[in-house]
Image (cartoon, rainbow, N blue to C red):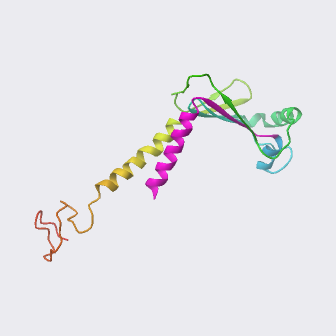
Amino acid sequence: MLKWIGTVVSVLILGVWVWSGWYWVRIGPTVRFKQSWLGGPGIPNNCERIMVGKGMVTAMWVRWSERAEYARRIQREERRLEEIPVVWVEGLPDRPEFSWRLPSVEDSGGSQLHLYVPLWVPFMILAIPTALLWWRDRQRIPAGRCQKCGYDLTGNVSGRCPECGESL
């Protein structure tokens, strides 16, 4: 079961990685959506935006020390008050573009911090154990054979493998 789940999720991550070479997907939570996550007005979620593009996931958020000022500013600027985040897709240049950087957290110099996670990292973290599960299942010796050497034990009543001497 785990090998199938790992395979499906790995293929999905790989598909998103390839697709992200041509498009950006941006999710910008609205004020009400941010407030609903933490339970009330004046308590916005500090996540500013999540983006997938150029082969990576980028999350931008406001420092905890600046949340109050951010909340005042965002409530003045926000025009959409729906309960769902605003999602939009933008095309990248004609040729695909991918980033191969390592995961990192960077300071923008302002009130925001940025987390960069290239999609190849979660893909590798999931694909390697999944490949090992597939390989392990391929190496399994079927029932009715010696588990040490693979000799066919059909009709064997002695309790020992005649090929290698392993007890059954």
- 165 vs 109, nearest the viewer: 165
The residue at the far front in this view is 94
- Spot occupied by residue 114 in the image (x, y as percentages of width and height): 65, 31
- Viewer can see residue 67: yes
On screen, residue 151 above or below 61 = below
Q: Residue at x 34, y 50 (%)?
A: 135
- Spot occupied by residue 40 in the image (x, y as percentages of width and height): 84, 49
Quarter of the figure with residue 56? top right
Quarter of the figure with residue 146? bottom left
- Viewer can see residue 117: no
Q: Residue at x 42, y 48 (%)?
A: 129
Give the left or right position of residue 157, taking residue 142 as reference: left
On screen, residue 108 above or below 48 = above
- 46 vs 122, nearest the viewer: 122
Give the left or right position of residue 38, taking residue 126 as reference: right
Q: Which residues are magenta?
A: 1-30
Give the left or right position of residue 145, taking residue 107 as reference: left
- Spot occupied by residue 4 in the image (x, y as percentages of width and height): 46, 54
Q: Residue at x 80, y 51 (%)?
A: 39
Does 74 appear in magenta? Answer: no
In terms of secondary structure, what is the magenta stretch mainly? helix
